[in-house]
Every structure is written in C-alpha cells, then in structure tokens.
Amino acid sequence: MPASGVSAAAIAARLSALGLLTRVEEHPRHTSVEAEIPESVSAETWREVLDVAAEADRFGLLATSLNGRTLWAVVRKTVPTTGDAGGPGHQR
C-alpha cells in the first residue's frame, strides 16, 4: 500500500473510532477518505473530527439537504523527484 494509503487508512481508523461510517478510495494521484457526519454531533466530537482531518493534505465538508453531511479528506501520493516532473516550460 502506498504511503498515502497508509495515512488515509489511519485517518479513516481514527474517524471510525469516533463512531463515523468511513470509506477509503485509491485514485491515480491521491487517496481519499469520506465520513458520514450524523445530524447530532457534540462540539467535542467536531473538534476531534477536525483534528483528524487536519492530518490530510486537503479536507472539506459537503452538506446538502438531500444527502446530509459528508466530510472528505485527501492525501496526495508522492510525486517522483527524478525526471521532468515539472513538465515542459517548468522554470528551475
């Protein structure tokens, strides 16, 4: 499992320990974690959720009247340090 997968799995495990239903998905450039946030969440739990989400490279909250609230977090996969990682026109 790539390092991003390990980090995402750790985030998912901590969110699950808080009683949240989580999903982890591998993508070409990142690993994502989603967690369903119930309607009734204490302020202390919110603080813990945000502390966990802060370990990701990016995170946010999707809230709709139809689907409730979903926390998402993204852990980027490492970019190779050799070769032309910047692509054409990249200034060094």
Image: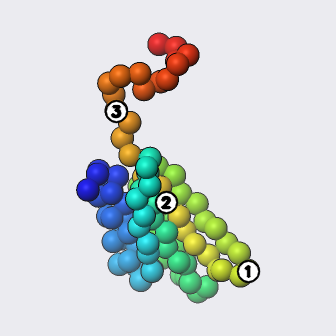
Q: What kind of residue is marked 3?
A: Pro
Mark number displayed over residue 73:
2
Mark number displayed over residue 80:
3
- Choose top left, top right, bottom left or bottom right for residue 43: bottom right
Mark number displayed over residue 8:
none
Residue 75 visible in this rendered orientation of the protein: yes
Looking at the image, do the residues carrying marks 3 and 2 touch, with CB atoms under 8 Å apart? no
- Choose top left, top right, bottom left or bottom right for residue 10: bottom left
Label 1 to label 3: alpha-carbon separation: 41 Å
Callout 3 crowding tier (Cα within 10 Å): few <14, some 14–19, many ≥20: few
Q: Nearer the viewer, mark 1 or mark 3?
A: 3
Label 3 to label 2: alpha-carbon separation: 22 Å
Q: Residue furthest bottom?
A: 40
The residue at the point 45 percent across, 60 percent down is: 32
Find numbered disc 2 in the image and state the secondary structure of the residue it sits on.
Answer: strand
Residue 26, relative to residue 83: is it above or below?
A: below
Which residue is at the front of the view, 85 or 11?
85
Q: Nearer the viewer, mark 3 or mark 2?
A: 3
* Residue behind mark 1: 65
Find numbered disc 3 in the image and state the secondary structure of the residue it sits on.
Answer: loop
> What is the x, y in percent for residue 87?
49, 23
Q: Going from the N terminus, do you reach mark 1 or mark 2 first?
A: 1
Residue 48 visible in this rendered orientation of the protein: no
Q: What kind of residue is marked 1?
A: Ser
Q: What kind of residue is marked 2?
A: Ala
> What is the x, y in percent for residue 90?
52, 18
Residue 31, relative to residue 86: is it above or below?
A: below
Which residue is at the front of the view, 46 or 32?
32
Callout 2 crowding tier (Cα within 10 Å): few <14, some 14–19, many ≥20: many
The residue at the point 43 percent across, 49 percent down is: 28
